[in-house]
Image (spheres, rainbow, N blue to C red):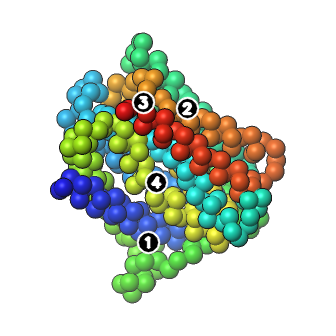
Amino acid sequence: MVNFIQLVIGMIFILVAAMVFCNALEHLGEKLGISEGVTGSIFVAVGTALPEAIVPLIALFGSSASAGGAGAGAEIGIGAIMGPPLMLSTLSVALMAFSVWKQRGLDGLIRPEKTGLNRDLKFFTFGYALAILLAFSHNFYANRIIDVVVVMILVLSYFMYVMLTIRASSALVKDGHATEAEDELYIKHYLKLPNNLITVAFQAIAGFVGLVYFAHVFIMGITGTSAALGIPAFLLSVVLIPIATELPEKVNSIMWIRKGRDTLAMANITGAMVFQGLLLPVMGILFTSWQLPAEKAISCITTFIAIAWFFVHSSKGQHFKVKHFIVNGGLYIVSLLVTLMVFN
């Protein structure tokens, strides 16, 4: 019972801390005069993706994972790395689209800025595919030099992605895609403090500290619940951890798209996917055996199908329709059902 309470408390306060952190980053983007693409794909995306980064780290170093990557800690860590891209590319975009179904209709258009969207999708596909191929290869052969080379490629690719996104910012601002914070800075609203760079930084740090602490609480809860129920830790981490850690992306994107800010809504999701596809696997490669047996590949395969569905419509040069993203939600349900059958 105590473990379940820890799980619920951790899940709730991860969301609260992420909202505090993202609110500060929105105001930072506005003060710096950068585009919604940069704010969504880098600042807010990294902020809301921090739980995905923190949870596997705590699982790997805070549990009894062995050097070879065995144990519940490694299982949860690998599951927490592979699960979030599936959640974002399927359920998250489906919920975002569903939230404007009545406003726009099934054939209603969703109009994100295409240049940034295509850049996000290409970088994610490259990094995630490289990491998953390496995981498959570890089932038969592992070489530490190859692992290090892949890690370097992933890290450098993310650095290149950030540089390209920032470089495109000024042109997007001129085209009317500048960042504007929708909500008042929380620390100003509740504590009556001034809205300046110092208070924005203070709120961001407070949100980050909250993310670290409650991610630890959540991991303790999920590990204990897994043991008590006799459910594989990997299954719980693929299903439950993404639900908790992806809540900020879902909530923010739904709020933004309902206000007609399609670019910010989509960039929040796809930017987080780039972070997850390029940087999160680095932790798995360095600190676990990073193996992907066939029964654990379902989430990865579904993610690639969802991304292919993105590319089919993005490559046409047309805007997405609401019904296109609802298909992604169906992919998530199918993946979940197959995963449950495999682990039953």
Read off the residue under disc 4: 246
Distance from disc 1 to disc 3, alpha carbons, whole Å, reads 46 Å
**What percent of the width, then of the height, locates residue 338?**
49, 35
Read off the residue under disc 1: 200
N-terminal label among 4 and 1? 1
How many numbered discs sit on the rendered protein? 4
Q: Label for residue 342?
A: 3
- Which tag is nearer the camera, tag 1 or tag 3? 3
- Which tag is nearer the camera, tag 1 or tag 2? 2
Distance from disc 1 to disc 2, alpha carbons, whole Å, reads 40 Å
N-terminal label among 2 and 4? 4
**What percent of the width, then of the height, locates residue 178?**
67, 67
Give the residue drawn at x 24%, y 51%: 221
Q: Is residue 108 left or right of residue 273?
A: right
Query: 60 or 297, which is in the foreground?
Result: 297
What amino acid type is highlighted by mark number 1? Answer: Val
